[in-house]
Amino acid sequence: MKILMVGAGGIGGYFGAQLIRAGADITFLLRPTRKALIDANGLTIETPADTFTLRVPTVSAEALRPDYDLIVFAPKAYDLDDTLQSVAGASSRGFILPLLNGMDHMQVLDQRFGRERVLGGVAHIAAMITPSGSVKRMSDLHMLTVGSRAPAQETIARAFHALCEKTPFDHAYSDNIEQSLWDKWVFLASLAAMTTLFHAGVGRIVATPFGHELNLQTYAECCEVAARCGFPIDEQVRIKASTQLTLPGSGFTASMLRDMASGQRTEHEHILGGMIRRGQAHGLPCTLLKTAYTHIAVAQSS
């Protein structure tokens, strides 16, 4: 199976490198500056346990051909349009595996390629590109979940998961991948809303008189949106998420807070805005989500 990995950031770089180490045939599609750096120095991965550097195949958008069985999208959600343009030379065949946050991208990709070509994928990882250009995984969390959304995808989805089984990262095959996407989105939207609103990790928020309650109320808002959209969050998933969102002493934050603090563009439109729009369509007020969204929108406009 020939795989095109679009991007070598926290998600694409980390999971792609680990898959290559496990024997996968992966080529990275990169922008010129990132391509020149990796071609010259290799792709370096830093983890809490070790650091390694790989020489990896790369390609530019201009040189792409429709030679790939699977194209993995791993950009920020706001870069989806640019990504679609960059893969134009390769996207006339093969399946698409997006690893983006939120759900808006699934509608865009289904319209562009047809639902029968678009698999589902969920990446759980805290990672970033360092000033030197390496990919740094910042915690023990490194989980990739994949699943098919149409019968014709089952074979390639299972084959990709078989490659994941050879890697050191955690992995799962979901028989209901769209529910898995919603499970992550509901949790991420809740975490992003509260940690960006208060510029603090979970532990500092819940240490205040009302922080514990507010975190759970935000999660409940998102769960209600999911339920109204036909994807109710399972009780065990809710218990696990609620525990993580109220853990005393936890430094857990969303990457959106790091992006906001460093003056970078954030995914608030896709993670929070998308949740709010779906809630409004079902008559839900989404008060806490709107408060967090507005806070970020104002900060990003300054």
Image (cartoon, rainbow, N blue to C red):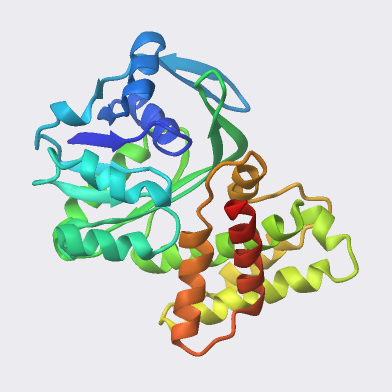
Tell me what residue is drawn at x 35 percent, y 31 percent.
19
Q: Locate the N terminus by quadrant.
A: top left
Q: Nearer the viewer, residue 288 or 214?
A: 288
**Residue lying at 64% horizontally and 43% vertically, measured from the top left:** 258
Q: In this view, does 282 lie above or below 27?
A: below
Determine the image quadrant of residue 111: bottom left
Residue ranking furthest to the front: 302
Residue 42 position in % (x across, y down): 39, 14
Res 192 visible: no
Q: Residue at x 14, y 37 (%)?
A: 68
Residue at point 38%, 17% (across, down): 38
Residue occupying the far bottom of the picture = 283
Q: In this view, does 292 lie above or below 232?
A: above
Camera-side residue of 75 and 163? 75
Q: Give left or right: position of 103 versus 6.
A: right
Residue reaching furthest to the top: 40
Q: In this view, does 164 lie above or below 183?
A: above
Position of residue 51 measured from the top left corner of the image (x, y, whole percent): 54, 18
Number of numbered labels in the structure image? 0
Q: Position of residue 104 (x, y in %)?
A: 37, 64
Looking at the picture, tell me which residue is in the foreground, 155 or 188. 188
Q: Can residue 249 be seen in this view?
A: yes
The residue sitting at the right extreme is 209
Q: Which residue is nearer to you in this view: 101 or 177?
A: 101
Quadrant of the rendered image containing residue 160: top left
Instruction: Name the spot of residue 164 as percent of width and height, x first.
Output: 36, 39
Q: Is residue 136 left or right of residue 147?
A: right
